[in-house]
Structure formats: structure tokens, C-alpha cells
Amino acid sequence: MARKVLNRVWAKSSGETLVDHTLKVLSVLRQIRERSPRLAVVSGEPRLWHRAFWACVLHDFGKAAAGFQAYLRGEAPPWKHRHEVLSLAFLQALDLHGDDIPWIAAGIVSHHKDAKEIVEERYNISIEPEHLGIESLCRELPEDVLASLIEWLGEAPRRWIAENGFSDAVVPHFHPQPPARFRAGMAGAVMAALKGYDSLLQALDGLEAAAAENVFAIIMRGIIRQADCLASADSPELQSAVFPDRKALSDRIGISEDELMAHQEGAASASGSIILSAPTGSGKTEASLLWARSRQTRRPAQGHLIYVLPYQASLNALSKRLRGTFGLDVALIHSRSLAALYREVLSEGRSSGDAERLARRADSLARLHQPPVWCTTPYHLLRAAYRLPGYESLWASLAGALVVVDEVHAYEPGRMGLFVAMLEELRMRWGAELCIMTATMPSWLRGLLRPLVDAEVSAAPDVFGRFRRHRVELVDGDLFGEKAQGIIGSELASGHSVLVGVNTVKTAQRLWEELAGVMGDESVLLIHGRYTSRDRLAREGFIAERLDARKGSGSPVVVVATQVVEVSLDLDFDTIVTEPAPLEALLQRFGRVNRKGKKGVVPVRVLVRSVDDGGVYEAGLVEKALSILSANDDKVIDEATVGDWIDEMYRGIEDRFTSKARASIKEFRESALRTLRAFQSSEEMRDLFDELFDGTEVLPACLVDEFRHLREVAPIEARSLLVPVSAAQARRHADSMEWNGEWFVRIMDRPYDGDRGLML
């Protein structure tokens, strides 16, 4: 009888019933527990799953109200009450342990809205129930529906626990009551639950952020909201990634087991968190997977594996490789991941409509942290600390995770301090384990990171010896001088593909025009960060294709590139001519040349002057880099001594960098980590988070008509017409910009084309 009545009660406007949705939420909760069983340990509360279970059982019961049902069916305007508040009334049917009641109430009433909106604004408990509308709210449940909900509650959860082996949930004594008697106690039950929630909030507010109760509150709300959102998204079954062992990994990359390098073997046998140091191109990604396999073997069902890199192009390439080569289910998460996914699906021959649908689906599941492996930026992790909406689910997903941080040296000291503090928090308080990878790391940075790990793993001397692949040549003049351009032309004529490293977009655009005028458009390509994402992705793909074709009988190419190439695609040039820069940047550029060392020793040429560095780099670091390279001019770079070069560059000024990073660590701990609380996303913290991003996006005026058309037929494609610019550039060209409130974009009236990018 109960199920027949409840089949008429919807949870979604699609017609999905309340019972079906509730069972889906419970199923996802079970899957979360199976994938991340250590959450109870991290939270410090063995009753985590019990409390989350009963909150999920009851969370949407209030949707059975007549007014809400009419709204779902399109027969009435939005309901004036909150359904989760009415759901609290059903707590009276269960003889729950006293300590559990406020927590379960918190899980129910917070699964959509923050605490402030519920207990301070909409349902302020200092006001009498009749003035809050609680009495009338409780009368909105039809008699037969109320009776059926009570009957279902007494039978279905017990049966579900038995059928699904969810032994962490305890079935309390059930109090069956006639509907009239139950209704009489509903308003009192709602108010008691709201008061219990408010008391819990006050107790948490009096504790330190690191208190076990606060960590538990964050994790509990996080898994309840994640279960509800994934169920609403019709998520596929959650899976735990199975990482390849030594044999499987060797087979995947086409080598025998005994060809694995020492640092890969070391990562596979390491215990706990590590710093992994190895040359660019020596298989650090493979080493990280073997490390993950080792941790998974020692501690099954580890949760998520999270790759953190600084640049979107690197993340796009890595996610494809992890999916394609290693067969892993991977979430790509960054500010332009939707556009990248759309382009990837489109390249498979799908229609734009199918590509849009599939990309949105993949992006939605990624941001709900459904896949077991992520490729993301440090900023996504920082969203948790800055309490952006959904932050508790992010913390719950980070708890107990394996976090692989690559290119750790790529950040300036202030940003580095934020990331170090976040990694420390994850390691020390949230049960995460770290694999911090680098090809080049100064000692001052290693000093900050070493306390976060258990061991260091380094490539063997013979590996560094195998990577003796570059010979330094200093070249007088700048990129527009006869000497530099003569070298570029000579190398191209000899059949060599040349990377030309440039420090600013303006110089790169000007140089491309000059070289293309002499060598031809087909032979000279340009890549920098001031293209639309559509054009940049297309150019990156075209460059990769040209270099791949070069391995056969394809023609050589000159690529003029800014810093985007430093940790971008897996490109392999024959040589490089570059403007001067700090050593870390130069070594990253060199890493795009003769990556595997199969071309013998090739020249990497560094000019002694830049055309206009635009303040991109600190002058003192560039001067020191040139001094070190001058002492090693015409010598083969020994990768084993590169660390000494970098330390020499920072000698005498390392304290300044360390101090700036430590100041950032201290400020982040004070402003974010020590104010972290459950149930409270923060507009103030959102503003601080937004300040981390020195830039915006603009729509070139020449693309307005295309943008207008694409908004109607392919909205993702429309957003791919935006171009990133720095905040300083936006201020400098403010007179050329106007805000379009309908489209929520800034339109910039500056020249743009697909070859040069945005001209400023």
C-alpha cells in the first residue's frame, strides 16, 4: 500500500519518485564508503556512515508536501518553504541515540543550504513556530502520503541495510504512530531539530578548525551532498582505480620490466609520501603510477588519485595519456576544461550537438569528483580552503587521497606558500599522501617541502648520464639580430625543427611576422597565451602533428613560443634558440628539445639579451643565469649538476624567497585554514580566492557576430572565443573594452586573428 501511494510522490520534475531517488542516494553513499572507507578514520568518528545513512534516508521526505509536489509538476510557483526543514519532522519516528540526533538533523537540513540561511534567516529559532509557518508547513503533507512515509520508513531502510551489507548503519527502534498523532508532534520535532542544529553550530564555532568535531562535520556534510548530487546526475557506478603493477605498466609503455629505471623502482617500493627527482623525459609519470600502486597495495581503497599541474595544456595532455595509455577513468578539472573536453569529443567525429552533450556530462561528473583519478590545478584544491560552495564535498574527496604534484617549482614564492600550506594540511590532518615530482628544485624550496614527506627518491647517476643531451651555446645579440636569425634559418635549412623561446607575447608576434616573411607561413608557427581557447587548442594540435610528422618524412618547422611551451605539450624539437630567463625556465624550455636523448647531444642556444622582457622575470635572476651559463658555455649539460646551478643562482637571495613563501604560508593558515568551518561557505573568502587570479577573459570585437550565433547553437563553442588577458593589460586597455551584461563578457576592440592572436 505504501509503495503504491509513494509512487505518486515525485522527488524531481522529471517524474523520478521520492522512493527511487532516496534509494539512489543510498546506493551512491554505499559506493563512496567502498571507495573511501578511511573517511571514518580521518573524521575521527566511527559513526560517520551511520549518521550519513539516516540523513540520506530522510533528506527529501519534505518534498512530499502538497505545495512542493505542485511546483515540481509545473502547477504552482516555487514553494515558499524549504523541503529539508519539513524532513526533520520524521526524526521523531526513530529512537536515535541522543548524540546522533543533532548530527543527523544537520546532515538533513544542510544538504542544500548553508546554516546561516536556515537557522538565522529563514527559520530563526528565536521566533515562535507559528510565526515561522512551521505549523502550516506540517499540514501540507496529505494524510495517505504521511501514513505511507511512516510505513516505508519502518520497513525499507532495514531491508536495504541487510541487502547491501551496510553494517555501519544501526537500525534504531522504530515508533509507528497513527498519522494524526504523528502530525501533532511534527512542528515540535522540527523546532527541536533546528534548535539541536543551532546548538551544534555554536559548539563548533567555539572549537578550533583542527578539532575532530569540525573535521567530522565537514566530511559528513561533504559525503551527503556528494551522494545527493551524484544520484541526481544519474552517475555511473563509482569505481576505484586499479593502478598498473610493474609488469602491466611495462607492457603498456612497450618495455620489459628490467628496463624500468631506478627512480621508478624506488617509487614502487617507497613507503609513504615522497619527493621524486628525475630529469624531464625520464618517466616520472610512470614512476608516480607505480608509487600509487604501492600505496594502494598497502592500503586498499585509497580514494582518489589526484595529479596537480600548473598549466592547462599539461593537464589536457596528461588526462588523455592516462586514459589512452593506462586505461584510467580521469576527471579533467580546470577553468577551461569544458572547452577542452568539447574539442576532444568533436575531434572524434561527433556532431557539435553530441559533443556539447557529452562534454557537459563529463565536465559535470568531473566537478562532482565522480572519476577516481583527477587532473587539476592547485587552485581547484584551494577552493576547499577558501570555502567556495561545495567545499565540504571537495574536502571529503581530498581526504585520504593520493596527491601527485608535478612541476612544483613553477610558482612564484607567494603562490608557492599557499600550495605548501595546503599540502601540509592534506598530509597532516586529512590523511592524504604526497608524491612531489620535479626535474629542478632549488634547495630553499626543498627545505619547505621536505618536512611533508617520508623519503626522497632520485634518479640514479646513470640515468642523469643518459640524459646528457644538450650543449649550451651563448649567442650574442637578441632575436632580431643577424646572428640569431642566421642560426634559425640555417637549422631549418638543415632539416631541423627549431623552438624559438620568447619572453613576451608582443615580441613573439613581431618575430613571427618577420620570420614568416622570410621563411614562409608554412615553415614558421606561433604559439602563446593570448589566443582564443579554440585557436590555441587547434594550434597546439597542429604543432604536435607537424613534429610527429617530422619523425617520418615531414618538413621541419620553426615554432615561436612564449612560456606556454615550458610545461606544455609533449613536444620534441631538434634545437632551441631562446631569450635569456631564470635557469628553471630555461631548463624547462630545453626539456622540449631532444627529450629522450635519442639525437645525441644537440645545441641549446641562449641569447645574451632579450628584446623586451616586460618585467616577466626578476632581472637579478636572469643575470645570474647568464653568468652560470657563461661559465659552462660550449659544455654539455650534466643533469646531475643542474641542481647546483640553480642553488648558485639563488645564492645570497634564497632567504628572500624563503621568507616570502613562509609569510604566505602563515597568512594562509590564519585567514583560511584556521577559520575553516562546516556549513558556512564564505563570500569574503571567495573574494580572497578571486584575488589569486591576475587576469580576465575578453571577447575580441571582430568575433562578436560569431559569438552571438554560437550562443544559440553551441554555447560551449561560444565560450571558446574568449581570450585571456592579465589584469594589468585589461587596465591598460580599459578604453577599448565594454561590458556586455546579457552575455556576461567583456568585449575588447583590439585586432585579433587566428595567426597572431590578440594584438595589444
Image: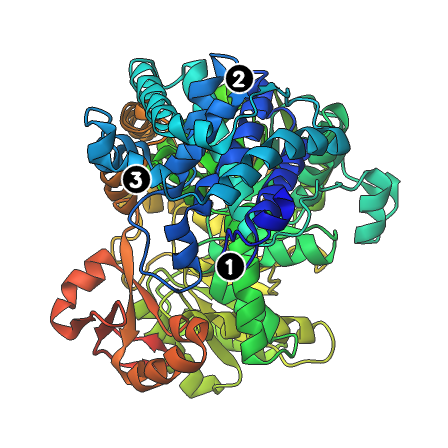
Q: Nearer the viewer, residue 194 or 206?
A: 194
- Residue 571, compared with residue 634, is above or below; it is below
Q: Nearer the viewer, residue 199 or 178?
A: 178
Q: Earlier in the sequence, mark 2 or mark 3?
A: 2
Q: Which disc, if any, is residue 136?
A: 3
Q: Number of labelled discs?
A: 3
601 sits to left or right of 510:
right
Q: Quadrant of the C terminus?
A: bottom left
Q: Nearer the viewer, residue 173 or 285?
A: 173
Q: Earlier in the sequence, mark 1 or mark 3?
A: 3
Tag 1, which secondary structure? helix
Rendering quarter of residue 403: top right
Circle 2 Cα neighbour tier, 10 Å, few/some/many (<14 / 14–19 / ≥20): some
Rendering quarter of residue 477: bottom left
Q: Quadrant of the N terminus?
A: top right
375 sits to left or right of 103:
right
What amino acid is at disc 3?
Answer: Ser
What amino acid is at disc 1?
Answer: Ala
Q: Position of residue 371 (x, y in %)?
A: 62, 47
Q: How is the image coloured?
A: rainbow
Residue 578 seen in the figure:
yes
Q: Which residue is mark 2?
A: 96
Which of discs 1 and 3 lies nearer the camera? The answer is 3
Q: Which residue is mark 1?
A: 313
Q: Position of residue 357 (x, y in %)?
A: 55, 69
Q: Residue at x 39, y 46 (%)?
A: 582
Q: Residue at x 54, y 60 (%)?
A: 15
Circle 3 Cα neighbour tier, 10 Å, few/some/many (<14 / 14–19 / ≥20): few
Report how far apart the C-alphas of labels 1 and 3 lie in the structure. Answer: 56 Å
Rendering quarter of residue 335: bottom left
